[in-house]
């Protein structure tokens, strides 16, 4: 919520706001701990995309990009 408010306040001044949030990553250990639907369901309901993160490489962005 703080990052959203900051983005709204600072965006008109051409200042970008980025945020990284913790989540479940489906590594071998993540699959072991989050494979049961009764445990995963409430957490997935809180994630806008409705899925856990995979363990694929993350895209590193160029700071000159306007949008990611």
Image (tube, rainbow, N blue to C red):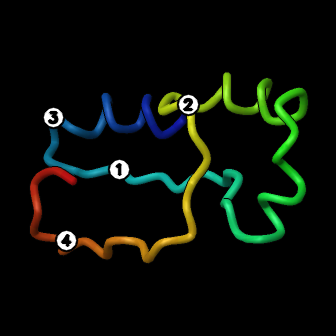
Q: What residue lies at 55% left-to-right and 61% top-to-bottom?
A: 54
In 3D space, how far apart are the residues under numbered discs 4 and 3 (Cα atoms)?
A: 18 Å
Q: What residue lies at 55% left-to-right and 30% top-to-bottom?
A: 50
- Comes first in the chain, label 1 or label 2: 1
In 3D space, how far apart are the residues under numbered discs 1 and 4 (Cα atoms)?
A: 12 Å
Residue 63 image label:
4
In 3D space, how far apart are the residues under numbered discs 2 and 4 (Cα atoms)?
A: 28 Å
Q: What residue lies at 67% left-to-right and 54% top-to-bottom?
A: 22
- Comes first in the chain, label 1 or label 4: 1
Q: Is residue 22 above or below residue 64?
A: above
Q: How far from the left and from the top, in percent, is residue 5?
A: 43, 29
Residue 17 image label:
1
Secondary structure type for disc 3 = helix
Q: How far from the left and from the top, in percent, is residue 57?
A: 43, 77
- Comes first in the chain, label 2 or label 4: 2
In 3D space, how far apart are the residues under numbered discs 1 and 2 (Cα atoms)?
A: 24 Å
In 3D space, how far apart are the residues under numbered discs 2 and 3 (Cα atoms)?
A: 31 Å
Closer mark to the observer between disc 1 and disc 4: 4
10 Å crowding of disc 4: few (<14), some (14-19), many (20+): few
Q: Which residue is mark 2?
A: 50
Closer mark to the observer between disc 1 and disc 2: 2
10 Å crowding of disc 2: few (<14), some (14-19), many (20+): few
Q: Are marks 1 and 2 in contact (CB under 8 Å)?
A: no
């Amino acid at each position: 919520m703080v990052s959203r408010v900051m983005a709204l306040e600072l965006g008109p001044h051409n200042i970008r706001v980025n945020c990284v949030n913790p989540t479940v990553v489906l590594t071998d250990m993540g699959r072991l701990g989050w494979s049961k639907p009764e445990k995963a369901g409430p957490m997935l309901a809180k994630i806008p995309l409705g899925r856990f993160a995979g363990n694929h490489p993350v895209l590193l962005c160029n700071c000159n990009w306007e949008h990611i």
